């Protein structure tokens, strides 16, 4: 049976690790946080001292860190995966980074014999914990077939979106432009309702049973009307970063993104005022302006 690894054991990475362990895989992990490492060890995982040790022990390594700079360090540094992983092994890049960054990473791995699958995920903290993430996987079809069992341990829906590195990240950026816009429209509608004196439960009941009642809207409204703005597993920094990737890609391609651009500015406002908050805290920033709150 293959051995697996996870680098980055936060809200998302811990879910990946837990589901790999549940599936019976020996799983190695590394995180800069000793607290996260301890939680991983309590699950039954094996703690490594650096990313390279994870690579030495594992056939398939999931990289779930925050940004492209961290990905580069994990893979290409002195203690990086490139120096320890065996030929024929695979890096599954589940982090969301700029498409150009993964294309550069692919060039650096060329000739190493280490395979790379560009496979960002969607589903957030609940999906990571439940093993029901959606994967947008780009890579060699034979490699993906060889490691499909490992991918299925953490994902309910695996979409093969292409073979070229960067295509997975490109599809994810398109998805995040939509999700970020839905978030922002929900936050604005919630603030409008609060100022107009509508009860939060009324808004939730109507919105969730209407044509707008998707999961993104429902979970946003639940947290808003229950006033849960921190610790829900959806830190604002992630969507703020992802919308930055969206806007950079749009600038590079010359595509106007009016709605996503507004979403990026709203998330900037929320992150500036409440840097430790989760996505829904953008509503709180808007409520501060109008002087009303949406409560259940």
Image (tube, rainbow, N blue to C red):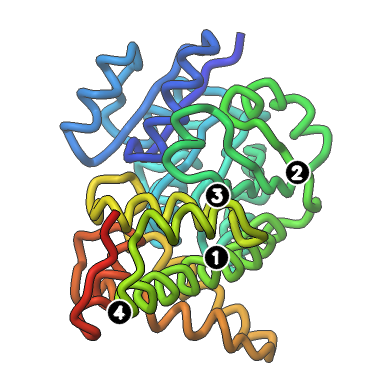
Q: Residues within 10 Å of mark 2 (few under 14, many from 20)?
A: few
Q: Which residue is tagged 4?
A: 195
Q: Residues within 10 Å of mark 3 (few under 14, many from 20)?
A: few
Q: Which residue is mark 1?
A: 101
Can residue 55 be seen here? The reply is no
Q: In 3D space, how far apart are the residues under numbered discs 2 and 3 (Cα atoms)?
A: 20 Å
Q: Position of residue 24 (x, y in %)?
A: 52, 8
Secondary structure beneath disc 4?
A: helix
Q: Are marks 2 and 3 in contact (CB under 8 Å)?
A: no
Front: mark 3 or 4? 4
Residue drawn at x 83%, y 38% is 141
Mark drawn on residue 266? none
Horizontal arrangement in the rendering, residue 170 relative to residue 161 (left or right): left
Image quadrant occupied by the C terminus: bottom left
**Whether label 2 touches label 4, CB < 8 Å:** no
Mark 2 or mark 3, whichever is nearer to me? 3
Of labels 2 and 4, earlier in sequence is: 2
130 to the left or right of 161 = left
- Position of residue 129 measured from the top left corner of the image (x, y, whole percent): 44, 30
Do the residues under discs 1 and 3 have CB atoms within 8 angstroms? no
* Above or below 67: residue 247: below
* Residue pictured at 74% horizontal, 46% vertical: 139
Q: Name the foreground residue: 56 vs 190.
A: 190
- Disc 3 target residue: 215
User: Dot 1, crowdedness within 10 Å: few (<14), some or many (≥20)?
Assistant: some
Please tell me whether residue 138 is drawn above or below residue 34 in the rendered image.
below
Q: Which residue is mark 2?
A: 159
């Amino acid at each position: 049976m293959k051995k697996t690894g996870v680098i980055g054991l936060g809200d998302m990475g811990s879910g990946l690790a837990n589901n790999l362990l549940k599936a019976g895989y020996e799983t190695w992990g590394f995180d800069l946080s000793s607290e996260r490492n301890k939680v991983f060890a309590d699950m039954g995982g094996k703690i490594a001292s650096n990313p390279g040790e994870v690579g030495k022990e594992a056939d398939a390594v999931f990289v779930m860190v925050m940004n492209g700079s961290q990905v580069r360090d994990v893979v290409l540094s002195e203690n990086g995966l490139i120096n320890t992983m065996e030929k024929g092994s695979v890096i599954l890049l589940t982090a969301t980074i700029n498409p150009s960054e993964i294309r550069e990473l692919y060039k650096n791995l060329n000739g190493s014999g280490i395979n790379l699958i560009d496979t960002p995920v969607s589903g957030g903290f609940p999906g990571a914990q439940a093993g029901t993430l959606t994967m947008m996987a780009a890579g060699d079809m034979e490699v993906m077939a060889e490691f499909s069992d490992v991918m299925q341990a953490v994902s309910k829906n695996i979409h093969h979106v292409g073979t070229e590195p960067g295509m997975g990240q490109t599809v994810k950026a398109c998805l995040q432009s939509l999700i970020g816009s839905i978030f922002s429209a929900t936050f604005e509608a919630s603030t409008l309702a609060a100022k107009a004196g509508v009860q939060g439960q009324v808004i939730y009941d109507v919105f969730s049973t209407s044509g707008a009642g998707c999961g993104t809207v429902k979970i946003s409204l639940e947290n808003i009307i229950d006033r849960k703005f921190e610790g829900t597993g959806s830190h604002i920094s992630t969507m703020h970063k992802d919308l930055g990737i969206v806007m950079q890609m749009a600038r590079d391609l010359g595509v106007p993104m009016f709605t996503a651009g507004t979403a990026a500015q709203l998330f900037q406002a929320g992150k500036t005022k409440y840097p430790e908050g989760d996505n829904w805290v953008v509503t709180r920033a808007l409520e501060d302006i109008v002087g009303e709150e949406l409560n259940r």
